[in-house]
Amino acid sequence: MLDAARRLFSRQGFKGASLAAIAQEAGLTDAGLLYHFPTKNDLLLAVIAQGDEEQDAALAQVRAARGLPLLHRMAAFGADLEADPILTALDVTLASEHLQDGSAINAYFVDRYETFRAMLAEAFREAAQSGDLRADLDAEVEAANMTAVLDGLRLQWLLSGGAVSMAGGMRAYVEGALARLSPR
């Protein structure tokens, strides 16, 4: 059920995918799907929770490092996201569909972005404090920039059918940013 919902939500969006289509994709009746997930929102929350568990493995490798090593690990994060195109498409689709609606899904994405940027900002601060990067860098700006580049690459990768390399683009951005911020 969750895999069927993930596929349809990633292709058609939350608003475009009907419960009937998801039930059919999963080989269930509408009633069978509704037995497990009384509302479409309940199903979406379960799909997001499943996706988080999978994405947490890639993020755990990033979070295991601190300071400059964490930032170096971000260079490989684009490749981690390319490994699951359905989850990446789902993430981009749901985030864009819930930009302004004040729902639980919107709150989830706001929190996730704030947590991600805070992790990166802390890594930039630690790298600056240890002398690995320039002391005058603005950690919040650098974290927001890295997040924006990653988001832009995800969108371009999806729109181009993989012709734009998220892995290569992220690697190039991180290497360039770290060279620019090097204390020389």
Image (cartoon, rainbow, N blue to C red):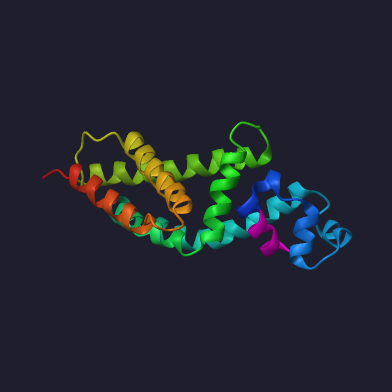
* Residue 18 image offset from top left, x and y in percent: 76, 50
Q: In this view, does 21 lie to the left or right of 61?
A: right
Q: Which one is nearer the viewer's eye here, 5 or 58?
A: 5
Side of 20 relative to 120 (left or right): right
Which residue is at 65% across, 32% downward?
A: 101
Q: Where is residue 128 in the image (x, y as percent from the top left)?
A: 24, 42
| Majority secondary structure in the magenta region | helix
Give the x, y percent position of residue 184: 10, 45
Q: Quadrant of residue 138?
A: top left
Residue at horizontal 79 percent and vertical 68 percent from the top: 27
Q: How many labels does the image show?
A: 0
- Say whether residue 105 is magenta: no
Taking depth in this image into account, of 123 and 9 the one nearest to the observer is: 9
Instruction: Decide: is 83 above or below 140.
Output: below
Residue 99 lies in what quarter of the image?
top right
Q: Quadrant of the N terminus?
A: bottom right
Q: Residue at x 86, y 63 (%)?
A: 29
The residue positioned farthest toward the right in the image shown: 31
Who is closer to the viewer here, 42 or 124? 42
Q: In this view, does 83 lie above or below 142?
A: below
The outermost residue toward the bottom is 27
64 w.r.t. 137: above or below: below
Q: Does the magenta stretch include residue 7?
A: yes
Task: Write the start and end of the magenta stretch as one range.
Answer: 1-8
Question: Can you say whether 114 is above or below 64 in the image?
Answer: above
Of residues 138 and 109, the one nearer the viewer is 109
Q: Is residue 45 left or right of residue 56?
A: right
Residue 172: image location, x then y, percent: 27, 53
